[in-house]
Amino acid sequence: MNTSRELKSAVGAVVVLVLSLLLATPFAYTWTGSHSAGPPSCISMLHLNIPGTTISSAQTVPAADDLPEYCSVVGVISPAVHFEVRMPPSWNGKMYFRGNGGFGGHIVLDTSLGLSRGYATVATDLGHQSPDISDASWALDNRPAEIDFGYRAVHVSSVVGKIIIRSYYGSLPKHSYFEGCSNGGRLGLQEAERYPEDFDGIIAGAPDMDFTGLMINFNWDMQSQRATDTSSDLTPEKAVLIGGAVLAACDGIDGLVDGLIDDPRKCHFKPSSLLCKAGDAPNCLTQPQVEALEKIYSGPHTSDGKRIYPGFARGGETPDASFNGFDAWLINTPDSPSGAFAFQDQFFRYLAFKDDNANFYWGNFDFDTDPRRTTFMGTILNATNRSLADFNRAGGKLLMYQGWSDFAMTPFRTIEFYESVQRELGVKRTDNFARLFMAPGMFHCSDGPGPNDFDYLTATERWVEKGIAPNSIVAQHLDEDGNVDRTRPLCAYPQVARYKGAGSIDQAANFRCVQPKSE
């Protein structure tokens, strides 16, 4: 790292220290009027003097689209962490932080989950500006930006956000919550591990905590399909075939034929069962397609069979209108490269290695020798390097959720992470502060044939504020017209939902959470 980068990192560390001290001591610019008199004018927030921070705008945004009026404060924390704080007039006394997906690059615009409930909300761009969340070119030879993306941006934005909230309302938030999925889930786990006192409750959906492993997996899936940006061995039409065959083989393994595979670990569908006997045809897979699918399910391995990262679960391969399933993440077409193709290509050019190589060709990645080259960046990007013990001691609560039919973030890696916490801290201790909810038939963060819409924020609030730990959360599935057509309880892992034997299988009340039978 050159001297300029080292200086920037040092300055960043000083800024974090100063901001932390500001929260622990009286702040120079605080509202001194009575709470009943209401907060100061929004525009007065322009005059805040926060070390290392520039406030660029402060304006009142009128109520619209079921959201209340709010004071929007926008600024930047040195060197380049842009943020926005939104503060409604009827404040519930709490802070809600929304995490970014993909590679970030713009301040998250949708904080409505918190704002509609009276939260003051905070969001950031993760330290860089980019037109697309699949673009990582900003990271080229830019270690400070990589660190901000990896973990620092959320922390400093939460600290500054609390200062602004205190200045506007006259008091700090009584509770602070973080919510994010995918990369946002990773950021939540980074917070829990690195800055355990920033948030009282963290919601981490489909967290790509092993970021380097995830990208290696994406690369494996592309190499396995001999992919280009416009083609791959598997096609959307063959995804329909695969999805139907998997469901036919495994739908009933949980004792209920309902279009969902409750636990894909019990599904042993073999791609070779679809092998074409007399040339390619719509109702079979060619030998290269069989081999590609087998590799997608197995995940990346070295040439001597050592596993690098788990593959994907069986179930949910059939495409739907959400464009968030198997086809969108793993199949390249002339109309669009897959999510896996786009993200891994950018990652290996700009984020994978200690020394960047913008000309690195993803197809040359060697699974025997190159994974170790990602180790350095893994110390910055991965949320697998530290313990959650301090977060537990701080009284924090962690709610994780994951779709079983997620073809971006494999459910197997999420379960491995959660079970590693159980091994370190013990099952009972883990259960007191961290719970995982697996959603059959749910795609990446949402969508899919299974119930995938649920109120994780209320469940986390009840846990943090009332000490009521969530044993189950009712999820719903919406039809194409937005109507609820199925509800089902999501159970705290390892429990699973089992039909009681009477009533509609589309009503959550007819299911109960039980311990799965050991095989």
Image: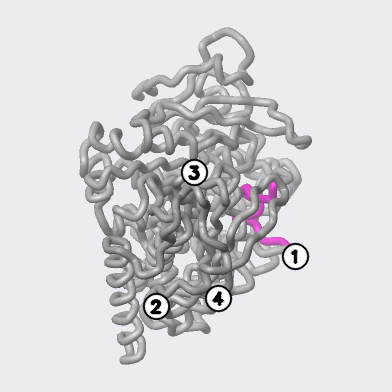
In the image, is residue 151 above or below residue 299?
A: below
Can residue 459 be spotted in the picture? yes
Can residue 362 be spotted in the picture? no
Residue under label 2: 52
- Say few, some or many: other residues with alpha carbon within 10 Å of mark 2 (under 14 / 14 to 19 / 20 or more): some
Q: Residue at x 51, y 25 (%)?
A: 489
On the image, the x and y values in percent for residue 358 come to 51, 83
CB within 8 Å, label 1 to label 2: no
Q: Hey, which quadrant is residue 135 in on the image?
A: bottom right
Q: Hey, which quadrant is residue 491 in on the image?
A: top left
Residue under label 1: 334
- Residue type at mark 2 is Gly
Q: Residue reaching furthest top?
A: 502
Which of labels 1 and 3 is toward the front?
Answer: 3
Quarter in which the C terminus is drawn? top left
Q: Residue at x 45, y 46 (%)?
A: 93
